[in-house]
Structures are given as structure tokens and as C-alpha cells.
């Protein structure tokens, strides 16, 4: 059955502002027509979206659907338990308006996150389409080495200390090939330390230039793009030289490293909601209650550079794609990246493009990210105008993915 979306203020994912009230006719999984006061063909379902802004389906380019803020529990569950727990998460992300996600690290040494991706693609479960980097390839003692997180006395058959540790060119090359053999869409690696890992520092670079070069080249030979977890400027520079497609986080970047990214066409996924929220609360004891002391120490050490970095990112011309690190905080709050970006000086249109047309370019999804005739019908709508009030991105009440309606405004 065809579907006619009636009367919403339409933003196509590209222009500087919405075009005004338009109708969208969807036939099967594609947009058949866009125009003012379209005539509904016989047997067409008509959905009134007047008072709404309609946009392309959002894309979250940095998620962890199998991870929860309690990382220890995720690392000690069986792969089956991890996958089952993720079913509700996938539905939540879709109903938030995110019709596509890129998952950049699962919570088990197996490949359950790939099974989730494939189950969505074949219609067995409901969720956003997924592109997946199953694990974070990491130097030992780096951000992806979880041995220091788990207490030495913690018992259980599913306890994992190393999920994708690799040191030196030969081991790195082997690990990349194993990820791709399993079905990885992307390769992710740790270029620097992080905040949520106890034994490293986010400003330290944990792979040499030669190690990054062989990692990215191995992925590229097998037709896969690579992206690093990376905070510091030196890590960014090495990763860009190696030929990565994007940089994850980049919150300790300086002007030189941002310009290098811009010159090489490398995308930035700045995950500002979670990173800068922690940075701005370094002196708030209540905020940090129950959270790791080592993480607070790191944010206290780096909080000024993080806040200065946000200003540099907003002023730069780097291609920003939307990503949240959801899983490190509750997935239902991933939409909060929109107001976080705007509060840090990124314009609403740049933030919205980051989650639509720019994200589609990053991910190589040419039929998505833009509302136009012939494109795949991934469409979301929200009451109000996100260009005037970015907070309405948290009120999405219409979701269509590939022409199927998953949510619509109540009467």
C-alpha cells in the first residue's frame, strides 16, 4: 500500500532551511513524489503531519547496542544474553528516529552484534539498519584491553580480558583479517587511550605510525574503511596519515590536527553529549557518585582542553557526522547529541546535516540521508521546528524505515 505524508514542513537533508509544507508520496520502499497538495492514489494510507517538521531518518554513526553503562556486566554475560538484552535497545533507537546506526564495538568476544545486524536486515527483529565494526582492535594496555576493568576475583565462564588485542604488524594484520572474515563492515581500532579505561590516558597514542599504516592498509585491501577511537592530536595526525575514513571523538584535537582532517576529507564524530557533560561536571561530587575514580581524574586533568577543543571544532570546517557513543550512557538519550552540539557552537543545520546527508556520505549510503524522489523512504517527523528549537529532535513521533511505518502521531 502506498503512503501519503500530508502537510509537514519539509527539510530535505541538504538545504539551509525547510522548504515549507509539502506532501510526500511513498510507494513500497521508495519516495515516489514530493510536492504541494499531492493527490492520493486509490487505497493510499494518508497520514497527517501538519505542525511537524519532516526530515530524512537520522543516523547515529557511533553506537554500542550491546553495551550498557555498567560495562563490567556486559563483559561477563554470555553472547546470547548480550544479544537478547539488545533487542529492546534496537527498538528504542529506531523509535528515537534513528533508522541507521553504525555500531563500533560489541560487548563479547564473539560476533553477536553481526547476528543482530543480519536479523534486522532479514526482518527477523525490529531495529535500525546497522553497519558494524564488531570489536575495537587495541594495543595491550590500551583502550580496548579490558583486563584492568574486571576485578581479579570476579568469576564466571564468560569473563573476557582481551577481546581484540593486537600488538605489532603481524598480529594487527591477522586481527583485521579475522574481523573481516566474520563479516565486519568497518574496522575500528584504538589510536589513543580513553577516559573509561583505567590503564591509559586519552592524550597518549597507543599505536605507532607503522602499526596504524598496516592496519588501515590491510582493511583497505579487503574493501573496508577504518576508523579510530582517538582523542589526542598526535593520534589524529597518525590516523589521517594512515588513511582512515573518520575519527571517533577527537575532543582533544588542536587546530593543526583539525585542519589536517579537513584537508584530507576525514570526517569527525565528536560525541559531545557524553564527553563534555563529564568534563563540565568534574567538581560535582553527586554527579560522580558511583562512577570510577580514575575516570573522574582523567576528566579533571583534561577538562579545559576538552572545552577549548569544542570551540575549535565549531569554528573548523571539518566534516562533522553525528555519533553519540550510546551504550556508555543510556541509549534512549542518544538524541541529546543534537542539543549538545548546538550548545557547543555548532549550528542547528550543521548538526542536522551531520545526522542525515553528511552521515550518509560517511557511511557510503547513497540512497539515504536525503528526501528526494527515488530515494529510500527513511523519513522521520517531529512536532515543531528543530531549526528554531533543537530540543524537538527528542520528540520524534513519526518513524518510517524503508516505507514501513513504525510510529505515527496519536490522534
Image: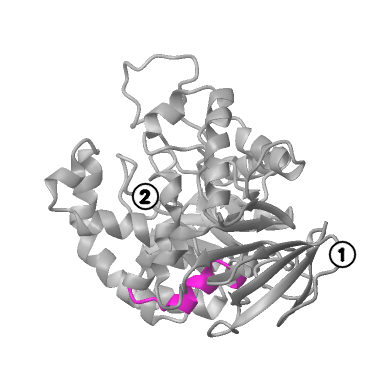
Location of residue 284 in the rendering, given as x and y in whole percent from the top left corner: 14, 50
Q: Which of marks 2 and 1 is nearer the N terminus?
A: 1
For image coordinates 31% across by 23% down, the residue present is 151
**Residue at numbered disc 1:** 42
Instruction: Residue at the far right: name it.
Output: 42
- Above or below: residue 98 compared with residue 132: below
Which is nearer the eye, 263 or 286?
Answer: 286
- Above or below: residue 62 compared with residue 4: above
**Mark carried by residue 193:** 2
Instruction: Residue at the far front: name it.
Output: 411
For image coordinates 67% across by 42% down, the residue present is 117
For image coordinates 39% across by 76% down, the residue present is 346
Instruction: Indicate the secondary structure of the residue bearing disc 2.
Output: loop
**Which residues fall within the magenta stretch?**
344-357
Which is nearer the eye, 152 or 94?
Answer: 94
**Mark 1 surroundings: few (<14), some (14-19) or many (≥20) residues within 10 A:** few
Which is nearer the eye, 386 or 290?
Answer: 386
Give the Cα distance between marks 2 and 1.
Answer: 59 Å
Is 356 part of what is drawn in magenta? yes
Residues marked 2 and 1 touching at CB (< 8 Å): no
Location of residue 63 in the rendering, given as x and y in whole percent from the top left corner: 51, 49
Amino acid at each position: 500500500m502506498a503512503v501519503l505524508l500530508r502537510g509537514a514542513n519539509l527539510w530535505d537533508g541538504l538545504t539551509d532551511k525547510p522548504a515549507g509544507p509539502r506532501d510526500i508520496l511513498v510507494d513500497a520502499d521508495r519516495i515516489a513524489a514530493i510536492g504541494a497538495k499531492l493527490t492520493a492514489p486509490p487505497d493510499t494510507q494518508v497520514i497527517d503531519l501538519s505542525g511537524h517538521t519532516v526530515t530524512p531518518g537520522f543516523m547515529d554513526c557511533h553506537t554500542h547496542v550491546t553495551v550498557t553503562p555498567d560495562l563490567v556486566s556486559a563483559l561477563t554475560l554470555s553472547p546470547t544474553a548480550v544479544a537478547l538484552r539488545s533487542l529492546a535497545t534496537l527498538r528504542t533507537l529506531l523509535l528515537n528516529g534513528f533508522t541507521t546506526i553504525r555500531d563500533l564495538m560489541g560487548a563479547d568476544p564473539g560476533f553477536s552484534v553481526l547476528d543482530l545486524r543480519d536479523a534486522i536486515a532479514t526482518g527477523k527483529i525490529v531495529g535500525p539498519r546497522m553497519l558494524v565494526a564488531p570489536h575495537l582492535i587495541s594495543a595491550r594496555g590500551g583502550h580496548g584491553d579490558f583486563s584492568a576493568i574486571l576485578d581479579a576475583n570476579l568469576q564466571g565462564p564468560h569473563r573476557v580480558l582481551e577481546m581484540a588485542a593486537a600488538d605489532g604488524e603481524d598480529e594487527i594484520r591477522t586481527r583485521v583479517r579475522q574481523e573481516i572474515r566474520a563479516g565486519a563492515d568497518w574496522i575500528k581500532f584504538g589510536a589513543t587511550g580513553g577516559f573509561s579505561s583505567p590503564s591509559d590516558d586519552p592524550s597518549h597514542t597507543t599505536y605507532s605510525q607503522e602499526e596504524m599504516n598496516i592496519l588501515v592498509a590491510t582493511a583497505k585491501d579487503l574493501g573496508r574503511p577504518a576508523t579510530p577511537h582517538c582523542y589526542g592530536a598526535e593520534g589524529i595526525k597518525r590516523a589521517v596519515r594512515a588513511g582512515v575514513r573518520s575519527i571517533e571523538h577527537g575532543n582533544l584535537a588542536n587546530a593543526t590536527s583539525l585542519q589536517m582532517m579537513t584537508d584530507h576529507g576525514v570526517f569527525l564524530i565528536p560525541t559531545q553529549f557524553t564527553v563534555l557533560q563529564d568534563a563540565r561536571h568534574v567538581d560535582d561530587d553527586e554527579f560522580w557518585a558511583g562512577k570510577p575514580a580514575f575516570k573522574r581524574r582523567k576528566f579533571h586533568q583534561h577538562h579545559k582542553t576538552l572545552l577549548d577543543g569544542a570551540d575549535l571544532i565549531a569554528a573548523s570546517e571539518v566534516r562533522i557526522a553525528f555519533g553519540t557513543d550510546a551504550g556508555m550512557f543510556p541509549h534512549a538519550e542518544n538524541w541529546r547529541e543534537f542539543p549538545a552540539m548546538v550548545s557547543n557552537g555548532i549550528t542547528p543545520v550543521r548538526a542536522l546535516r551531520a545526522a542525515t546527508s553528511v552521515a550518509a556520505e560517511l557511511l557510503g549510503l547513497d540512497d539515504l540521508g536525503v528526501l528526494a524522489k527515488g530515494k529510500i523512504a527513511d523519513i522521520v517527523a517531529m512536532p515543531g521546528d528543530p531549526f528554531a528549537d533543537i530540543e524537538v529532535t527528542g520528540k520524534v513521533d513519526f518513524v518510517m524505515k524503508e516505507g514501513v511505518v513504525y510510529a505515527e502521531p496519536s490522534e
